[in-house]
């Protein structure tokens, strides 16, 4: 059975011909058991400490209970543990209670929501009314796109955009272009000229698997040249990229020209939820027309913490500086071991391994060395592009990074994962 299952991925269990839901769940459980017994079950591990550069894991399968250096948290500036941000969450709960009680349209729109919208508009240097808050980063994409793009429109998407974008564009025409390939994008824009009402180009500022950036200036120019609208999801760029942490748009000096910005509170802003930034008329349209905003309860008062986190990006720039010292140190450590970290230019660092089984083995050995990472495989990346994915934090210490580099050195000797020179 193990042999059989070693070539499978979670994707294989999405749908299985002839199997009803119970048979499918049974087949899926066999796969989970295989992962657990093989020591490849790096998913949904139970953490008994807070989010941070070091976490405590419960025993699970071959995984021992104890402390691990963690690279799985997208809390880039370490703000989930920032005393002032915790205090702001508690103050929000103290004043307003634990829930909003209704969707924003029917009683769940509170002053802490409006304060956060204003804070977001100001952060992105837009007029008041330019922001809407959703309860996840995922719905910031899926809900807004589902609302804006209909069948006579077109979404032109970079192949590597997040799953939430794909969910949002199911009801519209879709064309995908090769990752970061400007010629391919231009070709599509030329071909679809005059054929659709709204032509929306959708890219990430920083891509979540390779950690590379989109060439936003060129993408913006070509999009506008052919009458398109540009949406940038900068979930992983905010707080990390750009002189003041305004993301890839700040880095490429296009912050005011990007038509629609989407993002999340779950990474740098250390909470849960997300936002869309756009022209105030478009924001008002989303407020009344996007189904998830209208029919789902508003964010809880704990989201008051996000307003404080936004301030702290500006007030305490040393976190971003420390993050970059860590990124530079870690990247050069990995490359001097001969490992392939691809084209990353952010806090997301992949070590590309290629082969799925070797990748699983690397994830297992890393755990044995006390290092918790995410082995990423198909369908999150293409079949031959398996990698260990890591997120760096400002609060990683040099000792944490050295421990991981030593582990990679050891694993490389065992599995031979370095680039052949
Ligand atoms: N966009 C991108 C690029 C992401 O990587 C993610 C999730 N990691 C999301 C959107 C969804 O954000 P959230 O997890 O906050 O719902």
Image (cartoon, helix red, strand yellow):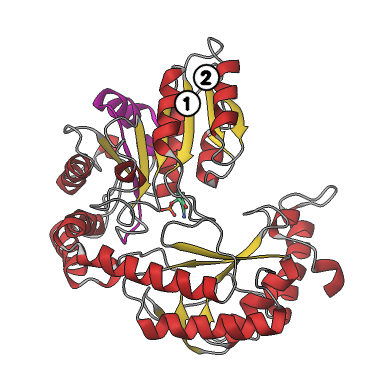
Q: Quadrant of residue 77?
A: bottom left
Q: CA distance from mark 2 to mark 1?
A: 8 Å
In this view, the mark in front (2 or 1): 1
| Disc 2 residue lies near ligand 1 with CB under 8 A | no
- Residue found at x 44% / y 17%: 227
Question: Circle 2: is it few (<14), some (14-19), or many (20+) Cα within 10 Å?
Answer: some
Q: Position of residue 382 (x, y in %)?
A: 68, 52
Q: Position of residue 65 (x, y in %)?
A: 52, 89
Q: Is residue 4 left or right of residue 115?
A: right
Q: Position of residue 294 (x, y in %)?
A: 36, 35
| Nearer to me, 76 or 265 | 76
Q: Quadrant of residue 49?
A: bottom left
Can the viewer see residue 56 in this picture?
no
Please name the residue that numbered disc 2 is placed on. Answer: 153
Q: Position of residue 234 (x, y in %)?
A: 39, 46
Please name the residue that numbered disc 1 is placed on. Answer: 200
What segment carries the magenta color? 270-294
Q: Is residue 249 left or right of residue 415?
A: left
Residue 297 vertical position relative to residue 373 in the rendered view, above or below = above
Q: Is residue 110 left or right of residue 347?
A: left
Residue 45 vertical position relative to residue 301 in the rendered view, above or below = below
Residue 22 vertical position relative to residue 133 in the rendered view, above or below = below
């Amino acid at each position: 059975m193990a042999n059989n299952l070693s070539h499978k991925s979670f994707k294989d269990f999405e749908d299985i011909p002839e199997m009803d839901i119970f048979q499918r769940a049974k087949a899926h459980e066999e796969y989970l058991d295989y992962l657990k017994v093989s020591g490849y079950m790096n998913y949904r591990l139970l953490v008994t400490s807070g989010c941070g550069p070091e976490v405590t894991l419960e025993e699970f399968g071959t995984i021992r209970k104890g402390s691990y250096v963690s690279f799985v948290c997208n809390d880039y500036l370490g703000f989930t543990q920032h005393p002032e941000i915790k205090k702001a969450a508690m103050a929000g709960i103290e004043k307003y209670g634990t829930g909003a009680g209704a969707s924003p349209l029917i009683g769940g729109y509170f002053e802490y929501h409006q304060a956060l919208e204003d804070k977001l508009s100001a952060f992105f240097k837009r007029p008041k009314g330019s922001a809407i808050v959703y309860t996840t980063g995922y719905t910031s994409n899926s809900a807004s796109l589902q609302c804006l793009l209909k069948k006579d429109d077109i979404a032109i998407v970079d192949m590597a955009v997040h799953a939430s974008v794909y969910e949002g564009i199911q009801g519209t025409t879709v064309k995908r272009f090769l990752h970061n390939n400007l010629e391919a994008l231009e070709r599509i824009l030329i071909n679809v000229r005059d054929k659709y009402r709204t032509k929306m180009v959708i890219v990430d500022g920083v891509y979540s698997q390779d950690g590379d950036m989109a060439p936003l200036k060129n993408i913006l120019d070509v999009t506008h040249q052919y009458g398109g609208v540009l949406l940038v999801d900068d979930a992983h760029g905010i707080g990390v990229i750009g002189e003041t942490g305004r993301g890839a748009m700040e880095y490429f000096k296009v912050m005011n020209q990007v038509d629609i910005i989407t993002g999340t509170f779950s990474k740098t802003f250390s909470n849960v939820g997300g936002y869309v930034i756009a022209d105030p008329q478009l924001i008002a349209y989303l407020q009344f027309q996007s189904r998830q905003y209208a029919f789902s309860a508003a964010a809880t008062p704990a989201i008051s913490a996000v307003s404080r986190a936004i301030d702290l990006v500006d007030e305490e720039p040393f976190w971003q500086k420390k993050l970059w010292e860590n990124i530079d140190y870690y990247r050069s450590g990995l490359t001097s071991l001969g490992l392939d970290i691809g084209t990353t230019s952010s806090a997301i660092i992949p070590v590309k391994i290629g082969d799925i089984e070797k990748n699983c083995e690397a994830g297992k050995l890393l755990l044995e060395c006390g290092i918790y990472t995410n082995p990423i495989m198909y369908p999150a990346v293409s079949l031959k592009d398996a990698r260990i994915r890591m997120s760096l934090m400002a609060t990683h210490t040099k000792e944490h990074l050295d421990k991981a580099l030593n582990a990679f050195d050891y694993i490389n000797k065992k599995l031979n994962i370095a680039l052949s020179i």
